Image (cartoon, helix red, strand yellow):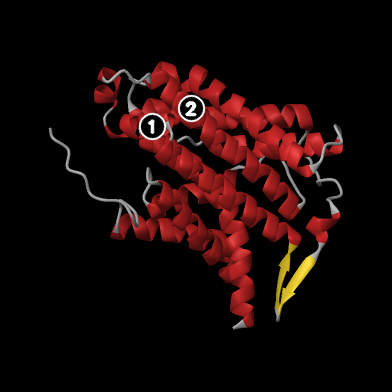
Amino acid sequence: MDQIAQQLINGLSLGSIYALIALGYTMVYGIIQLINFAHGEIYMIGAYVGYFSMAHLRLGFFESLLLAMIACTILGVLIERVAYRPLRNSTRIAALITAIGVSLLLQYTMMFFVGAQVRSYPELPAFMERSYSLGAVVISGKQLLIIGISVVLMALLQFIVKRTRMGKAMRAVSQDPDAARLMGINIDSTIAFTFAIGSALAGAAGVLVGVYYNSINPLMGILPGLKAFVAAVFGGIGIIPGAMIGAYFIGSVETFVSAFGYSLFRDAVVFAILIAILIVKPTGLLGRNVKEKV
């Protein structure tokens, strides 16, 4: 039981990072039906901004986290404005190919400027290096920080979506863009705001994963981005609570697979879950079948 509890804590830490990335996928898809495959690279750039802030600007962890979120917010809005907005009325395959192109562009642009080598985050504050014991279960300061920050950010997102004027506009646009436009909602501003929030969360995830694994590289966004996408699909893509549930499930599964000694197969298990959910329930755990009029 102690071993199971320990792996659940580890799974919550990893799932919290996936959740922050998956929320960006699910919000963008819910608004404009686009799978933004460049989202993993925004997460990667957030990790590098956090590293630069801590290693070169000598800023603290929380200041670096905030700076990474701001930088990724600007980047997300810029990508939406330059790459996706001109294709909004194009076919889905055109937007999808563009998203893959933006992803590759960000990867290799970052590689050009910072090099391909792996970098390690600088020395962390003492409170993050401590460990706390609950019986035989050990929780590190990093894990507590990651879970706490993720929960706060997700709660803030829920407040924005459910309680604010812009959140109501986001929900209206996701339901019926034409009706929302007739009601006076600025569609472009709402979509840009959605990209901004999703990118900010991805930037925060980048810093948290840099702190957790103490290692970053220009290609680090590929697999976590795909796993966060699996989490969004598992929970029901376009549904915010579903993305959270899916992320924690995927993080826990991956952790338990590694704990049982099959770490080489953990990625395969995650994508096998994607195949299974698409076969059994394509709309995801919380998704519902929607009939379209032809």
The amino acid type, in three-letter code, at marker 2 is: Phe
The amino acid type, in three-letter code, at marker 1 is: Met
Q: Residue at x 75, y 70 (%)?
A: 132
Q: Position of residue 86 (x, y in %)?
A: 42, 16
Side of 29 relative to 252 (left or right):
left
Q: Which residue is mark 1?
A: 170
Q: Which image quarter holds the N terminus? A: bottom right
**Which quadrant of the figure has residue 129?**
bottom right
Question: Which one is in front, 158 or 67?
Answer: 158
Q: Position of residue 264 (x, y in %)?
A: 61, 64
**Which quadrant of the figure has residue 76?**
top right
Q: Position of residue 30 (x, y in %)?
A: 37, 37
Residue ranking furthest to the left: 294
Give the structural element (helix, strand or loop) at label 1. Answer: helix
Disc nearer the start of the sequence (2/1) = 1
Side of 60 relative to 30 (left or right):
right
Give the structural element (helix, strand or loop) at label 2. Answer: helix
Q: Are marks 2 and 1 in contact (CB under 8 Å)?
A: yes
Q: Which residue is mark 2?
A: 193
**Which quadrant of the figure has residue 246?**
bottom left
Q: Looking at the image, can residue 262 be seen?
A: no
Side of 193 relative to 209 (left or right):
left
Q: CA distance from mark 2 to mark 1?
A: 9 Å
Give neighbour class at mark 1: few <14, some 14-19, many 20+ (Cα, 10 Å). many
Q: Looking at the image, can residue 291 be seen?
A: yes
Q: Residue at x 50, y 32 (%)?
A: 100
Q: Residue at x 30, y 52 (%)?
A: 282
- What is the number of the mark on residue 294? none
Q: Which image quarter holds the C terminus? A: top left
Give neighbour class at mark 2: few <14, some 14-19, many 20+ (Cα, 10 Å). some
Q: Residue at x 64, y 34 (%)?
A: 69
Number of numbered tags placed on the structure image: 2
